[in-house]
């Protein structure tokens, strides 16, 4: 076992824990365990750097440094002050604190943040006569506090900016899909990267861009370099450059792709935004875009892997929603024989109007909205014949 290994907590969205676990196995992490909206594992700096650079479903990568107990505010202050913060921070660096609390003792995360800040600053004042400054937006070192009941876990945030910010988006459409959610949906759907991929309600293009990055094996963070771990005392610049170089060597050439990717939307502004995001992410040759109603979309008559995030009630008049989903179902049945479709349904009543029985259901959250991620199989011929 590597003596340099330490615990790592990787945060994700609810429902994506299984695909994040698979990513961590591929990256080489050890002792992997699914948690709620997170996966824990063990690894060294190489694993920590690789998760930040290569994981498509990680939102934030934390390195726990201490777990302590506190039954009141004074005890929390004292315990935090006893941590050797000079090992992680110095007066030339700025820091910020993010607190999450599930406790009857500590009921306000903002107050916890204030007490932790006071403890850290007071320790530096007493030891050096000086203090590091707070910078909530562009901090050099980010500290994560998680309190459940009387247990407080203190971690360093190695990511800084959340990892769903890939760097290819410059404009957002109506109700844009989170990049981590989009990548997670594609990975959950087990797309084989050989079947043509279709999103005929592409919005700002997040699903098709993430599909293109997966098909080309492009690291999700290839366009950004502002990771918080680069400000840590043990940052290894050579290791970081080697990890990036090795990942970039694995990128597939666009001529080697075995599938085509199609994006369409009825909105011209949506297609314009999508094309811009595609261009920012990779070659525009990878994805065919069309401004058209999904019922008028003409595609090669081959099986398709379809993933769509249709408008929910918030974006449609309620009276129109049922009819809209009924049209989606009719289109799938009539034009996509032999294909499989995954639909992120935020309006669970209207989804029933699709008129197909889903073969799989998974619960995901698009922001605060609970959604069902539903798989539909459009058999060519009867279901019985398919399985024969």
Image (cartoon, rainbow, N blue to C red):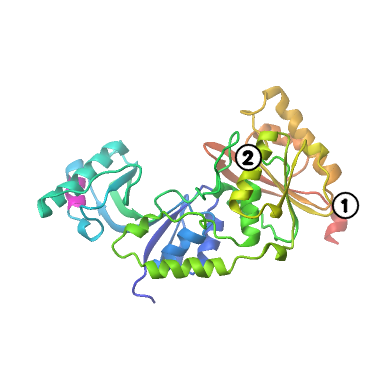
Quarter of the image where the N terminus is located: bottom left
Taking the magenta stretch, the answer to whether it contains residue 245 is no
Name the residue rendered at 12%, 54% in the picture.
128
Q: Position of residue 20 (x, y in %)?
A: 53, 57
In this picture, which residue range is highlighted in magenta?
75-81
Give the SS element for disc 1: loop
Name the residue rendered at 68%, 45% in the picture.
374
Q: Magenta-highlighted stretch: main secondary structure?
A: helix
In the picture, measured across the screen, residue 57 lies left or right of residue 40, that is right
In the picture, measured across the screen, residue 273 lies left or right of residue 180, that is right
Q: Position of residue 166 (x, y in %)?
A: 52, 50
Q: Position of residue 36 (x, y in %)?
A: 46, 50
Q: Which mark is residue 257?
A: none
* Residue 139, placed above or below residue 215: above
Residue 117 visible in the current orientation: yes
Name the residue rendered at 18%, 47% in the picture.
121
Mark 1 and mark 2 lie on one chain; the one further toward the N terminus is 2
- Comparing 151 with 267, the one in front is 267
Separation of marks 1 and 2 at Cα, in angstroms:
40 Å
Give the SS element for disc 2: helix
| Crowd tier of the residue under label 2, counting other residues whose Cα lies within 10 Å: few below 14, some 14–19, many 20 or above | some
Reading the image, the residue beneath label 2 is 273
- Comparing 8 with 182, the one in front is 182
| Crowd tier of the residue under label 1, counting other residues whose Cα lies within 10 Å: few below 14, some 14–19, many 20 or above | few
Name the residue rendered at 62%, 55% in the picture.
282
Residue 26 visible in the current orientation: no
In the picture, measured across the screen, residue 200 lies left or right of residue 298, that is left
Reading the image, the residue beneath label 1 is 382
């Amino acid at each position: 076992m590597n003596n340099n290994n330490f615990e790592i907590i990787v945060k994700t969205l609810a429902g994506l824990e299984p695909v994040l676990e698979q990513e961590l196995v591929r990256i080489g992490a050890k002792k992997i365990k699914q948690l709620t909206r997170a996966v824990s594992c063990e690894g060294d700096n190489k694993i920590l750097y690789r998760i930040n650079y290569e994981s498509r479903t990680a939102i934030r990568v934390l390195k726990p440094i201490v777990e302590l107990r506190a039954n009141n505010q004074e005890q929390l202050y004292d315990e935090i002050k006893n941590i050797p913060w000079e090992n992680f921070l110095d007066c030339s660096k700025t820091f910020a604190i993010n607190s999450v609390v599930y406790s009857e003792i500590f009921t306000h995360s903002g107050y916890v943040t204030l007490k932790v800040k006071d403890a850290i600053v007071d320790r530096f004042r007493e030891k050096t006569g000086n203090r590091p400054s707070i910078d909530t937006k562009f901090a050099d070192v980010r500290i994560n506090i998680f309190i459940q009941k009387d247990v407080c876990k203190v971690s360093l945030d190695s990511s800084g900016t959340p990892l769903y910010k890939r760097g290819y988006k410059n404009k957002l459409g109506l109700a844009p899909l989170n990049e981590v959610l989009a990548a997670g949906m594609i990975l959950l759907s087990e797309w084989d990267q050989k079947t043509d991929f279709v999103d005929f309600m592409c919005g700002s293009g997040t699903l098709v861009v993430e599909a293109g990055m997966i098909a080309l094996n492009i690291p999700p963070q290839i366009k950004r370099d502002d990771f918080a771990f680069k400000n840590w005392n043990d940052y290894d610049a050579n290791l970081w450059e080697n990890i990036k170089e090795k990942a970039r060597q694995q990128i597939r050439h666009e001529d080697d792709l075995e599938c085509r990717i199609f994006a369409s939307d009825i909105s011209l502004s949506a297609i314009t935004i999508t094309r811009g995001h595609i261009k920012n992410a990779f070659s525009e040759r990878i994805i065919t875009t069309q401004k058209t109603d999904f019922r008028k979309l003409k595609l090669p008559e081959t099986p398709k892997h379809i993933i769509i995030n249709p408008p929910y009630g918030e974006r449609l008049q309620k009276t129109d929603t049922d009819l809209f989903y009924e049209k989606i179902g009719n289109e799938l049945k009539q034009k996509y024989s032999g294909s499989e479709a995954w639909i992120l349904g935020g309006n669970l009543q209207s989804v029933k109007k699709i008129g197909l029985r889903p073969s799989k259901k998974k619960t995901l959250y698009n922001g605060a909205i609970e959604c069902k991620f539903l798989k539909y199989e459009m058999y060519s011929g009867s279901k019985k014949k398919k399985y024969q």
